[in-house]
Image (tube, coloured by chain):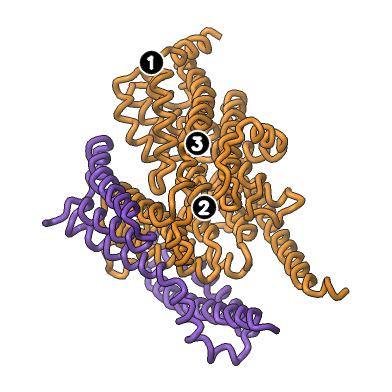
Chain colours: A orange, B purple
Amino acid sequence: MADFLSGAAQIFTLVTLIYMLAGSVAGIVAAAIPGFTVTMAIVLTLPLTFTMDPLQGIAVMLSVYVGGYTGGLISAALLGIPGTPSSVATTFDAFPMARNGEPGRALSLGVWASFFGTVISTIVLIFAAPPLALFAVRLGPWEYFSLIVFALTIVASLVGSSAIRGLLAGLIGLAISTVGTDPIMGRPRFDFGIEMLQAGLPFLVVLIGIFAISQLVSEVEDAPNVRSGNKLVTGAIDFQTWKVMKEVLMRPVNLLRSSIVGVLIGALPGAGGSIANLVAYDQAKRASKHPERFGRGEAEGIVASEAGNSATAGGGLIPLIGLGIPGSAVDAILMASLMVHGISVGPRLILDNADLVYGMFIAMIVASFMMLVVSVLSMRLFLRVTDVPKWLIVPVVMTCCVVGTFALNNRVTDLYLLIFIGIAGYTLRALDYSLAPLVLGVILGPIAETNLRRALMTDEDPTLFLTRPISLIFLVAALVSIVWAIWSHLKTQNNIERLPDAPSS
Amino acid sequence: MNDANLVETHNQEAGEIARLLSYVVLLLASIGLFVSAGAIPPSRFEKLGAGAFPKIVFVGLAVVSGIAIIDAVRKIPRSAYGRFISQTVAWARRRYLVFVCLGALTAYLLAIPVLGFSIASLIFLFVLQVILMPRTVKSIAIAAVIALVFSYGLNWLFAEVFTVFLPRGVI
């Protein structure tokens, strides 16, 4: 209790709270810019925390972290461009909802879902950090590979109008992930002697090119509409704070399920928000009585994606605090920040620096409240984006995408990749390929390959994938997922075929 | 079938042919890359080499593309192939602003290493806004201010606040 109070006393000082508020605003603004990730924002914050106390520094970085997960939803909802990889699934429903004239509701749903997701994950973190961390570390490459196979079957539910094109898009994503040096031995692959391909295709450049550039140019398809000075999004810019809070709380099962998915995936080293939002969305769609409404502005979809990605913030801290294993790039930077202050991260962290760990838990809760307050107060300002005509916003956001792409690695060659990938993305969009499976393939490809090869390097017996119980559970879940997807796809097809006959019957 | 329905059907058929072409391209690319993956030397230290995972992916891509080709060929009526080129040209004409945007973006990205971020962005932003906008004195003035803020202003912000230096160019 003394440690808890000591941690609380360090957080609830005026200076720390002001720093945290600034961090929260910075995280939201940074993640709202396409191509500017939460990781980049945290990296830029790190040097600023060197002069602070350890807990103060960590609290500021957690504020940027929590704010960043929410900021990604702003461009996802208003522009249809995921500000961060963790808000890919948010675009599926938040963007159509904004387009249907409810941009305020779309943002508000996302903010509240993010808030509750973070709070739930922090509560789970407090109680479950030690046992969950021990479980996560027991998983070997067999279980990881099977988990990724399961995650890939989610493609089946994200396929859009055509299952075959969805599968093809997923496979194209996996193929893109094989370009560059292989993840185990570092052997060059498919670079065709071109220098800029030798390091592989950077994931963020693919994300910006595929989603942002293709979305932006598709905004100008209708020339008379653009020339008339029409706005990107039309409709009421009413944030409906309390009404939407009730709406989110009326979906307790979805909220809890998505948050738990986020915590569990966040707790697995190497996974994280970029996968959690898609898995949570998929689970919400499967559990829904009206899965056909998903992708057209369904509130359940926004709640699932945002609660899922925000809950990984708490989940990611589980292996970090319990074992000293960072669950994601952001957690690795948080760990580096502690090490800079001379604090060794590992199983003894909670024993030697209990006040710091409790302080981190309190900082997470405070950061989520700050994110909520900043979002509610500033969202009207963000919603002014809806007043901007297309002729202005398309070139400006394109420039922001270019800056984001360059700032990632300070490489001009990434800009050339951006235009190739942007043109390819628009072509696929015009041909009615679903782009989400492609992104999922790019994210999961290297993780799947690494674990498959690592498993067979450890033991050449492939039956271990089936004989290790957790691995088997994931593979059975993958099989069930595929069968369910085919069944529901056939059911939808039958319904569509029956519809034209309906009037005559 | 009325004229509007007929046009819609023709457009859908042209779309199906375009998708068929994309499946063929994917099939050929996956076969080529599968062969290329076979040339990656195996490793002495592991059962699967660097080429094994790509081979699995390209086999999957080839099989699914093959299924897609069979499905598409079954759906498309023979008469649709004759109309394909004219339909594609009409489609591209309707979306001419897309090609203008992609062309402007390509020129902009190629110009950045030469002109530097600020000058290239200023020109790109101003020109593209003027192309897309309903032209009035007010909107042109807004475009000029926006171009200035998001070129020199953004460059200043990144250099001074984030210490990220955007390309300066060679001139």
The subunit letter for the residue under badge 3 reads A
Disc 3: which residue: A380
- As measured in the structure, the alpha-carbon distance from the residue carrying label 1 to the one carrying label 2 is 49 Å
Disc 2: which residue: A455
Percent x, y of residue A265: 57, 41
Q: Is residue B50 visible?
A: yes
User: Which mark is drawn over residue A15?
Assistant: 1
The subunit letter for the residue under badge 1 reads A
Give whichever of A142, A19 is nearer the camera.
A19
Q: Are marks 3 and 1 on the same chain?
A: yes
Mark 2 and mark 1 in contact (Cβ < 8 Å)?
A: no
- As measured in the structure, the alpha-carbon distance from the residue carrying label 2 to the one carrying label 3 is 51 Å
Percent x, y of residue B25: 47, 78
Residue farthest toward the right in the current orientation of the protein: A505
Q: Is residue A177 visible?
A: no
Q: Are marks 1 and 2 on the same chain?
A: yes
